[in-house]
Amino acid sequence: MAHCIRVHQHGGPEVLVYESCEVGDPGPGQARIRQTALGLNYIDVYFRTGLYPPAQLPFIPGMEGAAVVEAVGEGVEDLKVGQRVAYAGAIGAYTDERLAPADRLVPLADDVTDEQSAAMMLKGMTAQYLLRQTYRVAPGDTILWHAAAGGVGLIACQWAKHLGATVIGTVGTEEKAELARQNGCDHVILYREEDFVARVREITNGHGVPVVYDSVGKSTFMQSLDCLKPRGLMASFGNASGAVEAFNLGILSQKGSLYVTRPTLVSYTATRGDLLECAGELMQVVGSGAVKIAVNQRFALKDAADAHRALESRSTTGSTLLIP
């Protein structure tokens, strides 16, 4: 009998209930997978609380994992039993076995471990589309990344440094500042102690940056616009401090003909070709050692509530795994 975490009603971490569940045979286009490690992400909190409404209640949260294929359904030709795979974006990860859409499963490279892949798929592919597609970071760019010691931040700052950028990161504590420095940040701003707009302007000699990557949301959004150079891009990809409030679009013209986008991984990996290209570039930089994946916390699947408490208290760094 498989076990999973289910949410029967929206609320705090206490609504994450560990219980048994049935996993049937795969249908057309599906694979049954035995999961070896699961990633924890802030989007899991959004679904748990109802900020992002699930298709139905109850539901199994979780968006990424690493696994071994146990069976494939009709029409699945590019996966085989026993193959190591990983995925991101297919809700229902908090379980030790599951059915998954086969076209969302990515074969794992031999030089990437299960734990690395479970820790990096959603966060790493997010970093890929942000750095390589939403705004294509080039040598000589100076960029601002909020929450630089978070799961996406640690991957993205290493990657941006590898691409030749100067990386400015914001963090909340000195401990996180040191972690950010070790993972690609050239300049680290303690946002509780410093005016990050003034520091960015100082670092860039008053010019501002061409792009700000912001997963914090409400508490940083408007100030982040002031960090941009004319025609700069704000990539708002998360709401850790709450959803960004409505604002007058005229502000963008007043601040220098700015651009704002609210991208999602779903849009950037909509086709299998897009997914394999995104994941393939991620595996290449991780497999080469250019980007290292820091798994700094591990919780048993049954302790998912404790993992959510740690994530929401901002006491975690790097990636957190749930182990079935």
Image (tube, rainbow, N blue to C red):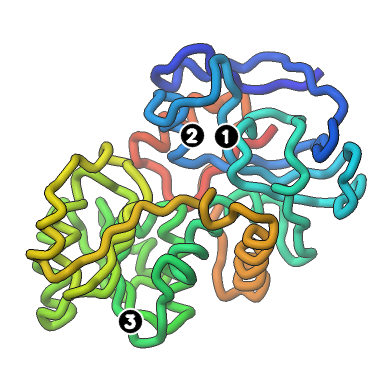
At horizontal 35% and vertical 52% (from top left) the residue drawn is: 262
**Is residue 176 in view?**
no
Amino acid of disc 3: Asp
Q: Are marks 2 and 1 in contact (CB under 8 Å)?
A: yes
Q: Position of residue 157 (x, y in %)?
A: 41, 68
- Determine which residue is flagged by label 3: 141
Q: Quadrant of residue 322?
A: top right
Q: Nearer the viewer, residue 241 or 99?
A: 99
Q: Position of residue 239 (x, y in %)?
A: 32, 42
N-terminal of the pair, mark 2 or mark 1, is 2
Q: Is residue 36 left or right of residue 307?
A: right
Amino acid of disc 1: Gly
At horizontal 65% and vertical 66% (from top left) the residue drawn is: 277
- Determine which residue is flagged by label 2: 44
At horizontal 77% and vertical 22% (from top left) the residue drawn is: 2
- Determine which residue is flagged by label 1: 62
Query: How many other residues sit within 10 Å of disc 1, few (<14), some (14-19) or many (≥20)?
Result: many
Q: Position of residue 224 (x, y in %)?
A: 19, 59
